[in-house]
Amino acid sequence: MKKPLVMLLIILVLVASTVYFASVPAQASNRFPQAVYQTPTPDETGRIMYTVKEGETCLSISLLTKTSLENIRALNNLDINCSIFSGQQLLLMVVIETPIVATIDITDTPSGPTPTPFRGNGQICIVLFDDVDGNGRKSDTETLIADGSISISDRVGSVSLTGKSAAGEDPVCFIDIPEGDYNISIAVPEAYNPTTALNYPLSLKAGDMATIDFGAQSKESSEKIRGGSSSWLGIVGIILVLIGIGMGVYLWRSNRIR
């Protein structure tokens, strides 16, 4: 009789532990990588393609890539519901380059030094969102947070930009950024705890438009969730203690009867 009761107690402890860890909200553990989108440069035919990721919708892709739903549907022959699947290649736009007609100067000129190759520019956009559910991923209903401190610097120290996150619907964008390797960081406002990493390394190429999502959860929301979890855990603990006492009494009485 002792072995089944011991096994039952072990199972109850495991269940209680599972309930506890499932109910603890995400804090500043940086377990969740932020969503990063980088608009690819056009291919040799001038097409810009996007690969659909798990859980994405036409609406989320539209907001992420700044491409209208109508264009996404029209360019990809999608139905009115805009049905897509993970791994699908979507055409976002076709870039048509205007040919440049150059005039030929036949005047002899002395050869000069070789010019330095031109490095193109890109764009970096930052989103700081209110991660209400604490999962490190922005949903369509989660709003943006203002007054987060943004820092953008390249690896060689030639570019150093700062700014503030903004509320509303649009990200904060830095345009005409020279291509190169960058470190993107953000400091969340005092009333929030981060739910994603606060730093992100980014390799920016000419023509890219990179968007990086950073998440934070208000301390008030975190405390409410944690308080509810603690109350539930306390109830589970009391139940386990009562079960343990009952088992002890049962085993004690069983030994006396023998």
Image (cartoon, rainbow, N blue to C red):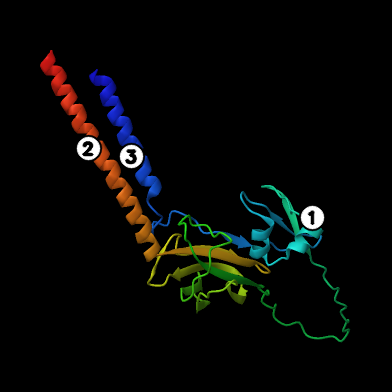
Element type where label 3 sits in the image:
helix
Residue 254 versus residue 161 in the image, above or below? above
Out of 164 and 107, give the one closest to the viewer: 164
> Disc 2 residue type?
Val
Residue 104 position within the rendered picture, expressed as x and y whole percent measured from the top left: 88, 81
Earlier along the polypeptide chain: callout 3 or callout 1? 3
Viewer-nearest of discs 3 and 1:
3
Residue 109 position within the rendered picture, expressed as x and y whole percent measured from the top left: 81, 86
User: Which residue in the structure is indicated by mark 1?
Assistant: 76
Quarter of the picture holding the N terminus: top left
Residue at 29%, 44% in the rendered image: 235
Viewer-nearest of discs 2 and 3:
2
User: Which residue in the structure is indicated by mark 2?
Assistant: 241
> Disc 1 residue type?
Asn
User: Which residue in the structure is indicated by mark 3?
Assistant: 16
Element type where label 2 sits in the image:
helix
Earlier along the polypeptide chain: callout 2 or callout 3? 3
Residue 206 position within the rendered picture, expressed as x and y whole percent measured from the top left: 66, 69
Residue 3: quadrant of the picture: top left
